[in-house]
Amino acid sequence: MRRPATRADVRVAQLQDKSNLFFTDVQVCGEYPKYLNRYFKENGIELSMEPEDEAEIKKGTVDYLGFSCYMSTVTSDVSKVKKASGNFAMGELNSYLEASDWGLQIDPVVACL
């Protein structure tokens, strides 16, 4: 029997989304999001940037962002869950779905939205 999702599971999912999507945040918005700058500071990560780099990032935003939604990942605060890969992100194995020969789990409901 599966355990119901907890508040901790939801928080882990939110944090996982941020770590998976910050690349596109920078590409689309032209700057590092505040949550990522806070993460860098809290974890002692220092970006090495020239004075003109921020202006270059701001200037170089994308006109179009395309992605494939034909994947499914889940996450949990329980660390012993088996991992599975998506198209670009790691998640945990969704035991409700079958996997392709490459190990990708495709959620037919999400893919049709």
Image: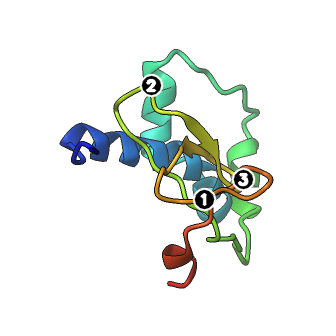
Which secondary structure, mark 3?
A: helix
Can you name the residue that lies furthest to the top here?
44
Image depth: mark 2 or mark 1 in front: 1
Instruction: Name the residue nearer the viewer: 78 or 49.
Output: 78
Disc 2 crowd rating (10 Å Cα; few below 14, some 14-19, many 20+) is few
Choose top left, top right, bottom left or bottom right for residue 61.
Answer: bottom right
Instruction: Name the residue nearer the viewer: 77 or 32.
Output: 77
Residue assigned mark 1: 98
Residue assigned mark 3: 57
Of label 3 and label 1, which has the lower sequence position? 3
Which secondary structure, mark 1?
A: loop
Label 2 – label 1 distance at C-alpha: 20 Å
Image depth: mark 3 or mark 1 in front: 1
Residue 69, percent across and down? 62, 71
Residue located 76% across and 33% down the image: 50
Residue assigned mark 2: 80
Which secondary structure, mark 2?
A: loop
Label 3 – label 1 distance at C-alpha: 40 Å
- 53 vs 82, left or right, is right
